[in-house]
Amino acid sequence: MKGTSHQSADHRAVDRRRFLSAALGACAASAPLGFVSMQLAASMSGSLTKEQRDSMTPSQIIDELKKGNERFRAGKMASRDYLAEKRSSASGQYPAAVILGCVDSRVPAEIIFDAGIGDTFNGRVAGNVVNDDLLGSMEFACAVSGAKLVLVLGHTACGAIKGAIDDVELGNLTGLLGKIKPAIPETKFEGDKSSKNPAYVDAVARTNVKLGIENIRRRSPVLEDLEKKGSIKITGAMYDLATGDVEFVG
Ligand SMILES: [Zn+2]
């Protein structure tokens, strides 16, 4: 039995990877972030294990996403082995977070958070709106699969937000934009309230994230209950297309 646990520890050491690891968070406190990140990148192989994911708190997962975004902005992303990640995750996945983002081609969550295969569940829909199917997906991610963070990710200069402000009508898009519209009267803003004003568009996008979080809590007793128990966190963030920065706003 002793041999088994020894072997298991060795295996963990070899298999230790990357991005989302609470244990390595301790190292970050005593060394410059960039250095630690590069060390992490160099030691990466395989996907997040159940043990690694389960050892993290929701707040630690947020911290790891922030670190990943810093690596992205610094141009020091992890040099990952996607084939190793594919191999190690094929028989099971243990993602730490579920991210609801926009379909915008400039906001790929895995890239802006420097995450790999198996790290995060991702739902993408124009304007990162909440609907029943996405709620079901988030419930699967957290209640069934064990993810500990629900992140609603909005972004600057969002075309869907502009479309909602402009009352665009087009096929099925009309109904989708209708899900964004409640954010418009909820947004307190002084100045030009038009889609031509980037500051206004971004203010509505922030409100849309806030309402998305509220929607998730109100419409999913499953997720609300998990959050009340402290098992998960439901929060939001805004991605800046120009700077690459992700600001957590929840
Ligand atoms: Zn968008």
Image (spheres, rainbow, N blue to C red):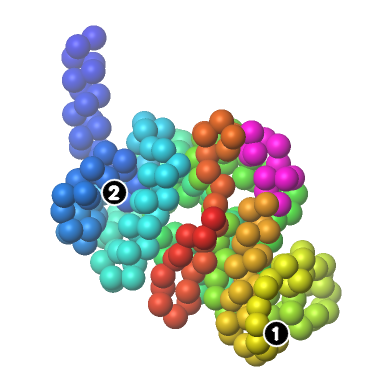
Q: Is residue 224 magenta?
A: yes
Q: Amino acid at mark 1?
A: Lys
Disc 1: which residue: 193
* Cβ at disc 2 under 8 Å from ligand 1: no
Q: In the image, 155: left or right of 37? A: right
Q: Which mark is residue 18?
A: 2
Q: How many marks?
A: 2
Label 2 or label 1, whichever comes before in sequence order = 2
| Disc 2 versus disc 1: nearer the observer | 1
Q: Tell me where residue 130 sits by quadrant.
A: bottom right
Q: In the image, 19: left or right of 57? A: left
Residue 138, given in percent of the width and then of the height, sits at 62, 45
Q: Tell me where residue 186 sits by quadrant.
A: bottom right
Residue ID at (66%, 65%)? 208
Residue 205, given in percent of the width and then of the height, sits at 62, 71
For label 1, the SS is loop
For label 2, the SS is loop
Q: Amino acid at mark 2?
A: Arg
Q: In the image, 29: left or right of 186? A: left
Determine the main secondary structure of the stretch shown in magenta: helix
Residue 6 in the image: above or below residue 180: above
Q: Tell me if label 2 and label 1 are in contact, CB under 8 Å.
A: no
Q: Nearer the viewer, residue 118 or 235?
A: 235
Magenta residues, as a range? 215-225
Q: Is residue 209 magenta?
A: no
Residue 34, given in percent of the width and then of the height, sits at 21, 61
Q: Which mark is residue 130?
A: none
